[in-house]
Amino acid sequence: MSTLKAQPFDYYSMTRSRVRPGPDEQEAWILKYLFLLYNPEGDRPSPQSPEGATLFAEYRDLNETMAKSGVLVDSAPLQPASAVTTVRVRDGRPVLTDGPAAEIKEWLGGYTLVECEDLDQALHWAAKVPAASNACVVVHPLAPMSRS
């Protein structure tokens, strides 16, 4: 069984193209990108409404397409900001706060984790996420991990 080990991260060299193993290397890099799907607070329609059914069908279809293309790792909606708990440790004790860490106008409504050849491919997929058309999708490269 292999374990993942964090490797030094160089944003400019690691996100623009996938690093392939050289002749004397035994491992390849895994490039993953986390899409953070933001929505205006309270702007997600109920799944039972016609708008909600259409929106959830768009996400389902996109996830199926990404899965068939081999880039989708995981994707899920999140509960609204009212369900969030923020944890901070102060003087060795956890301090719990209801709600997100900062006041926000847009809330994190979901995420998608993909494995892509490079940042350009990740941005291509991020532009297809329904949240990109009425709010925003933030693309975070994950620090590369090697399989060994």
Image (cartoon, grey):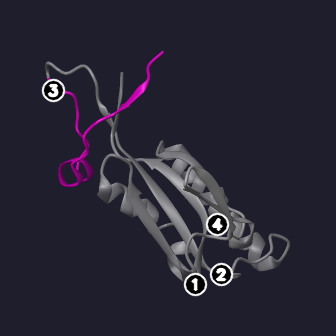
> Mark 3 sits on what residue?
22
Quarter of the rendering occupied by the C terminus: top left
- Mark 3, other Cα within 10 Å: few <14 / some 14–19 / many ≥20: few
Task: Find residue 14 and report its horizontal and vertical position in percent.
Answer: 24, 47
Nearer the observer: mark 2 or 4; the answer is: 2
> Mark 4 sits on what residue?
58
> CA gap, disc 3 to disc 4?
40 Å
Amino acid residing under circle 2: Glu
- Residue appearing at x 24%, y 53% in the figure: 11
> CA gap, disc 3 to disc 2?
47 Å
- Residue appearing at x 48%, y 42% in the figure: 70
Amino acid residing under circle 1: Lys
Which of marks 4 and 2 precedes in the sequence? 2
Q: Disc 1 vs disc 2: Cβ atoms closer than 8 Å?
A: yes
Nearer the observer: mark 3 or 1; the answer is: 1
- Mark 4, other Cα within 10 Å: few <14 / some 14–19 / many ≥20: some
Which of marks 4 and 3 precedes in the sequence? 3
Amino acid residing under circle 4: Glu
Nearer the observer: mark 3 or 2; the answer is: 2
For numbered disc 4, what is the local secondary structure? Answer: helix
> CA gap, disc 1 to disc 2?
6 Å
Which of marks 1 and 3 precedes in the sequence? 3
> Mark 1 sits on what residue?
105
Q: Nearer the viewer, residue 119 or 90?
A: 90
> CA gap, disc 1 to disc 4?
24 Å
For numbered disc 3, what is the local secondary structure? Answer: loop
- Which region of the structure is painted magenta? 1-22
Which of marks 2 and 3 precedes in the sequence? 3
For numbered disc 2, what is the local secondary structure? Answer: loop
